[in-house]
Every structure is written in structure tokens, then in C-alpha cells.
């Protein structure tokens, strides 16, 4: 708990000036309220004796000053508080995104964190932390300043006033919040956890809505969401009941303090030790000062949910990255040949090797295809080349330089990737293509689309390149999405192209168009094609056949067919299946 609190305080240091300003104006606001209550009651008490107006001038000016000052200081306090809070939220979101970016995709796949869970941490948990400053940090500091000031003020009249006041001030400011925190901490933590589960279920339900409806499972999903929602409501009611009880006890103790001050002051007035005009101002000013401690029980209640939210954020942010990035930018390669030398790789120490003593040469400008059944280790090679994972044994070189000398951003700058599941953002076609090279001109954009054989399709749309693609590109077919991905690769014009199952799940017509685009894309570029679909394999200069993490055959398409080994069997099996489908059709 202490460690989490210390780390949270470190994160809010960049906005400390705004926070200090907020605390300063907050204390002045409460002090103005105390001054307004005291001077106004003094004015009323004096006015009861019908003195000359000159005798009331100071009190009248004081009432006006404190009345105006309270409004001005409250506005300044709200302004600085909101500025500090909004800046803090911005900093937290940027910090968390920067923390999780190096973890993709390796650490997330190991921890099995869902997109809903990550979304809950980015949105709900960070939003929860906005209360850490406004309800947890600022109120205690304001309460300390006001408590010291009023204690000294009352002590100037009578020590018994000051001691009575500070005793109840500490009970309301420390004991009541402490008990409240103990009773509500577990509830606050549960609320954060239930919110996270609810968010995860909602995101999963929305993303998988079509499948849920298709299998008639939408009612079950809805029932689970309703169950979590009911649990959340129950916990929030419990917390609200605790806050209501705490507020009642706090108000009771405040009024008891005022009555005690009054009872202690009356004998002093009768004995002439205290001016009678000060009786009401002292009591009411004392009551007004408790405005500073009234937020403290709620602050302690919020502390549990704040620390739980912070713990969830730090849990992800502290996940160690699988790749150790070099401190300086990598070398600038003069050529783009790739060599894998005796590579052995495991995803976790407990796993069997995904790659076992792999040797592979990919000459500059050549196309090498990695083929084999699913799970043979083909995609693992691509992940190593992109520096998503770290290999345990062997070496990989790029242009003669050790791959570990390159930062991930160095690799992505010289590499274009077309994956089997192309992600399109819910914006226009133009903006999706410009992800590859934001500064590209309109002519370059159209040329890339033509090279990918997708320009005619885009031009036929009512809004052309300004057509929105929809969530994950749902408006387009798989082949169209793949050709948009290839257009991105053309636009980026990187010297290395990595293709991971680019024709998977495509119909023959779409597959043919994608393969034609790939033939054009690979020209003059170092290309790695990962596929288990053995179509148009003559485009590859070399084919490496993977089986159980090892390369069992290599050669050209014709050479491997003549060997009648594993490649020949896979090729024959696929073409036999294709022929059977054609006969049925």
C-alpha cells in the first residue's frame, strides 16, 4: 500500500504547481467562510445595541470582503483543481500507453489479458484516479492548514477553547475517516474489480455479438452482464449507506463542538473574561471551520478504490518487456539480407522449442517462402524478425549487423508487414493507407492503390478514398482488406516485406488478385512469405519447409517437387482437394 501510494505521488509531481495552487485557494476559501461567519455574527450582535454606523464600518467591510473573497477564491480553487485533474488524467493515459506499448504482443499473450480488461484499466481505472487528488490528497492538506489556524485563533482567547476544538477536529478528521476506511476499503476494491469484469464482458459481447446471436447465446451473455451490474449496484449502495452514516456522525460531532464552545464561553462572558459580542462569532466560526474536515471521511473511503485502481495499472506497467532495447539507434544497413544462424526459440522457459536450431539465408532482394502445416514455427520466425520476441540461442543478422543492435522502431522503419488479419481503423480509406507514410502525396497514394489492384474498387465507392471503412473494416471483404494492407506496404516502400498468411480464408478469385499484388510488391525487396497455401510458389526464390520447429527441406518449387518429400505431399494434397472441389462445383 505504501509503495503504491508513493508511486502515485510520483506520477502527480508534474502537476504539483497546479495542485499547490488548488490547495492554497481551497484553504483561503474555507478561511473566507470562517471570516464571513465570524464577522457577520459580530455585526449582528453589535447591531442589536443600535450603535452609530461608524462603529460598524469595520464589520461591514469585513462581511463584504469575506463574502466576495469566498466566491473569488472558490472559483480559483475550482479552476486550479480542474486544471490539475485534467492534466493528471492526460499524463496518466500517456504514461500508461507508453508503458504498455513495448509489451505488445509478447507480454500480453503471456498474461492472457483481454482487450476488455486493458480497456477497463485505460478508461475506468485512470478515471478513478482523478479522485486521488481532488478527494484524497488536497482535502487533508487543506484541513491541516485550517486546523492550525483556528487552533491558534481560539488559543488567543482561551486555551480550553483551543484544546476542545482540536480534540473534536482530530476525531472528525482522523478517527471517523480511519474507521470509515476500515469498513469500506474492501467494498471499494470490489467495486473496481466488478467494474473491470463488467467492462471486459461488455467489450467481448460487443465484439462477438454476431457469433453470440448466431449461436443463440445472447441471453446468456446478457444474464452475465446483468448479474455483474446487480453486484456493482449492491456494492455502490453499501458504500452509499456507509457514507450516509459517516456524514450523520460528522455533522453530529460538529454541532456538539459548537455547543461545547458555547457552554465554555458563557461563564467567561459572565465573569467578564470574554466580550459578549464574541460569543456567537466564536461558536459559529468554529463550526464553519469544520468545512475543511467534512471531505476527509469520503477521502478515506475513496482511498481503497484509488489504490486498487493504481495497483491494477502498475500490475500491467510493471510487466517486464521481453525485448531489451539498445539505448542508441541501430546502424543504418547498406543491404537488406537476413541470416538466421542456429536459432533456438521458446515462448516461455517451460515450453518446447518453437524453433530448433534454424539456419536460414535470405539474400538481399530475394523472396523466401516459409511453408508447412499450422504450428510448424513459420510465424515464430516473423515475430523474431520484428523483434516482438527474443530468441534464446543463435544469432540473427540484418545487413551483416546483429539484429539485437536494432531498436524495434529501427526495424519497423525499414519493414512492411502484411498479416493474415489486417486491422483497419474506423476511419477513412485514405487515413488507413496514410498510416504507412503520413506525408505521402495524393499521387503516391493512388499509385500504391493501383499497384495493389484496389484503386478501381476504391474509385467505385460513392466517397472514394474518403469512404469510412467501419469497425475493423467490416464493410469490405477479406480480399479487399488484404489488398488495402498491400497498398499500405507499397506506399511505405520499405526494403523488407514480411507477409504472414496473406491469402488465408480467401476465395479463389480474391486469392488470385492478392497473389498478383504480392508478385508486384516483392520486386526489388527482401521478402519473406509465410504460408501454408501452396499457390503460385514459383514466385519464391527459395522455399523452406518447416516441421515441428525445424527446416526439413529447402529449395525452389520445382526442386522440392522432384524430391517428392514433405513439400510434394503437401502440394499434392492441396491440389487434390482443389480438384475435388472443382469437380463438385
Image: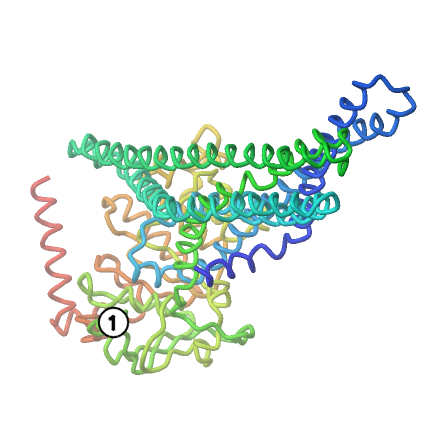
Q: Is residue 340 above or below residue 182?
A: below
Q: Residues within 10 Å of mark 1 (few under 14, many from 20)?
A: many
Q: Is residue 194 above or below residue 316?
A: above
Answer left or right for 249 relative to 53: left
Answer left or right for 548 relative to 187: left
* Image location (x, y in percent) of residue 457: 40, 37
- Residue 483 visible in the shown view: no
Displayed quadrant of residue 561:
bottom left
Displayed quadrant of residue 499:
bottom left
- Residue 496 visible in the shown view: yes
* Quadrant of the snapshot with the C terminus: top left
Answer left or right for 582 relative to 349: left
Q: Is residue 571 above or below residue 258?
A: below
Q: Is residue 434 above or below residue 67?
A: below
* Quadrant of the snapshot with the N terminus: bottom left
* Image location (x, y in percent) of residue 383: 34, 66
Q: Residue at x 45, y 34 (%)?
A: 468
Residue nearest the observer in this picture, 458 or 6: 6
* Image location (x, y in percent) of residue 489: 44, 55
Residue nearest the observer in this picture, 310 or 442: 310
| Total tally of numbered discs in the picture | 1
Residue nearest the observer in this picture, 184 or 110: 184
SS for callout 1: strand
Residue marked by disc 1 = 544
Task: Specify the color scheme.
Answer: rainbow
Amino acid at each position: 500500500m505504501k509503495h503504491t501510494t508513493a508511486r502515485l505521488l510520483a506520477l502527480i509531481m508534474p502537476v504539483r504547481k497546479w495542485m499547490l495552487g488548488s490547495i492554497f485557494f481551497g484553504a483561503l476559501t474555507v478561511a473566507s467562510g470562517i471570516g464571513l461567519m465570524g464577522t457577520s455574527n459580530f455585526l449582528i450582535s453589535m447591531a442589536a445595541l443600535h450603535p452609530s454606523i461608524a462603529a460598524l464600518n469595520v464589520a461591514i467591510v469585513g462581511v463584504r470582503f469575506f463574502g466576495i473573497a469566498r466566491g473569488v477564491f472558490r472559483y480559483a480553487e475550482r479552476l486550479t483543481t480542474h486544471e490539475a485533474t485534467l492534466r493528471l488524467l492526460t499524463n496518466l493515459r500517456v504514461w500508461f500507453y507508453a508503458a504498455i506499448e513495448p509489451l505488445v504482443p509478447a507480454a500480453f499473450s503471456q498474461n492472457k489479458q483481454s482487450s476488455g480488461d486493458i480497456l477497463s484499466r485505460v478508461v475506468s481505472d485512470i478515471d478513478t484516479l482523478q479522485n486521488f487528488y481532488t478527494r484524497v490528497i488536497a482535502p487533508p492538506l487543506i484541513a491541516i492548514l485550517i486546523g492550525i489556524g483556528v487552533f491558534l485563533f481560539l488559543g488567543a482567547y482561551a486555551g480550553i477553547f483551543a484544546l476542545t476544538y482540536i480534540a473534536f477536529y482530530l476525531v472528525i478528521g482522523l478517527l471517523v475517516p480511519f474507521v470509515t476506511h476500515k469498513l469500506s476499503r474492501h467494498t471499494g476494491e470490489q467495486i473496481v474489480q466488478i467494474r473491470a469484469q463488467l467492462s471486459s464482458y461488455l467489450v467481448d459481447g460487443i465484439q462477438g455479438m454476431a457469433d453470440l446471436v448466431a449461436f443463440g447465446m445472447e441471453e446468456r451473455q446478457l444474464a452475465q452482464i446483468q448479474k455483474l451490474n446487480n453486484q456493482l449496484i449492491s456494492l455502490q449502495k453499501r458504500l452509499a449507506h456507509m457514507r450516509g452514516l459517516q456524514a450523520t456522525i460528522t455533522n453530529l460531532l460538529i454541532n456538539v463542538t459548537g455547543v461545547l464552545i458555547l457552554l465554555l464561553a458563557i461563564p467567561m462572558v459572565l465573569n467578564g473574561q470574554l466580550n459578549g459580542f464574541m460569543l456567537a462569532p466564536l461558536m459559529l466560526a468554529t463550526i464553519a471551520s469544520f468545512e475543511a474536515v467534512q471531505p476527509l471521511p469520503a477521502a478515506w473511503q475513496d482511498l481503497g478504490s484509488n489504490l486498487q485502481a493504481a495497483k491494477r495499472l502498475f500490475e500491467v506497467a510493471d510487466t517486464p518487456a521481453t525485448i531489451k532495447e539498445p539505448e542508441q539507434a541501430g546502424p543504418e544497413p547498406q543491404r537488406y539480407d537476413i541470416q538466421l544462424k542456429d536459432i533456438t526459440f521458446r515462448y516461455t522457459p517451460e515450453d518446447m522449442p518453437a524453433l530448433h536450431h534454424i539456419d536460414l539465408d535470405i539474400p538481399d532482394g530475394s523472396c523466401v517462402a516459409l511453408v508447412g502445416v499450422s504450428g510448424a514455427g513459420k510465424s515464430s520466425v516473423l515475430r523474431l524478425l520484428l523483434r516482438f520476441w527474443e530468441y534464446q540461442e543463435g544469432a540473427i543478422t540484418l545487413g551483416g549487423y546483429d539484429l539485437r543492435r536494432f531498436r524495434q522502431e529501427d526495424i519497423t522503419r525499414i519493414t512492411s508487414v502484411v498479416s493474415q488479419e489486417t486491422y483497419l481503423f474506423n476511419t477513412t480509406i485514405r487515413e488507413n493507407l496514410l498510416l504507412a507514410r503520413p506525408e505521402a502525396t495524393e499521387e503516391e497514394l493512388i499509385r500504391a492503390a493501383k499497384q495493389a489492384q484496389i484503386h478501381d474498387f476504391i474509385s467505385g465507392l460513392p466517397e472514394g478514398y474518403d469512404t469510412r471503412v467501419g469497425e475493423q473494416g467490416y464493410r469490405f471483404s477479406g480480399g479487399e482488406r488484404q489488398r488495402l494492407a498491400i497498398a499500405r506496404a507499397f506506399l511505405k516502400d520499405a526494403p523488407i516485406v514480411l507477409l504472414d498468411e496473406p491469402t488465408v480464408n480467401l476465395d479463389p478469385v480474391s486469392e488470385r488478385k492478392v497473389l498478383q499484388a504480392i508478385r508486384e510488391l516483392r520486386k526489388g525487396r527482401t521478402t519473406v512469405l509465410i504460408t501454408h497455401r501452396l499457390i503460385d510458389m514459383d514466385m519464391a526464390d527459395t522455399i523452406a519447409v518447416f516441421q515441428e520447429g525445424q527446416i526439413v527441406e529447402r529449395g525452389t518449387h520445382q526442386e522440392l517437387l522432384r524430391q517428392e518429400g514433405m513439400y510434394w505431399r503437401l502440394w499434392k494434397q492441396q491440389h487434390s482437394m482443389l480438384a475435388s472441389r472443382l469437380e463438385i462445383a
